[in-house]
Image (cartoon, rainbow, N blue to C red):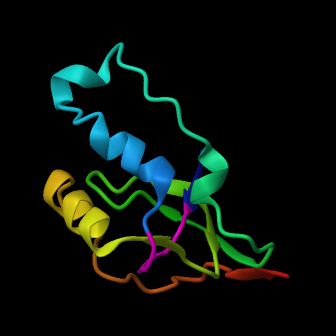
Amino acid sequence: MITIGVLVDSGRLNKEFQKILNANLTDEDLEGKVVKINLQSFIPYTSKKFSYTGSFTTPPCTEGIKWIIFNKPIQFSEEQIHSYQNYFEPNSRPVQPLNGRDLFESW
């Protein structure tokens, strides 16, 4: 399994993310509701990235997950960041030791 990590910084409104917020999805809506978005708007304009094999951020923190993290953030408005934080529970865990894992840079 591959997980793509994208950093978010405060800045301008992200129109595609706003479509998701405007849909006002609830857990009950997630099955069968479609919000058409351009996924490329969530990928920064850079080929620079880091990768490593780690785990999911939520229990049971399954290992063997390939992470790809772009080195530049995309932007959401302050209001969008606040809406995201209100909708989703925190899903990070404390930084873990490398335990022999390799971290790769790709430029």
Relative to 100, residue 6 above or below = above
In the picture as drawn, the residue positioned furthest to the top comes out as: 32
**Where does residue 84 sit, x and y in percent of width and height?**
26, 59
Tell me the residue at 17%/57% (across/down).
89
Which is more toward the observer, 16 or 72? 16
Image check: 103 left or right of 22? right
Does 9 appear in magenta? yes
Tell me the residue at 14%/59% (across/down).
86
**Where does residue 74 sit, x and y in percent of width and height?**
54, 72
| Tally of marks | 0
Image check: 18 left or right of 85? right
In the picture as drawn, the residue positioned furthest to the right comes out as: 107
Res 66 quadrant in image: bottom right
Relative to 70, residue 57 above or below = above
Which is more toward the observer, 65 or 84? 84
Image check: 13 left or right of 44? left
Q: Quadrant of the C terminus?
A: bottom right
- Residue 35 in view: yes
Q: Quadrant of the N terminus?
A: top right
Stretch in magenta:
5-12
Tell me the residue at 49%/48% (across/down).
16
Tell me the residue at 61%/45% (across/down).
39
Does 46 appear in magenta? no
Which is more toward the observer, 75 or 59? 75
- Residue 90 in view: no
**Where does residue 37 sit, x and y in percent of width and height?**
54, 38
Res 61 quadrant in image: bottom left
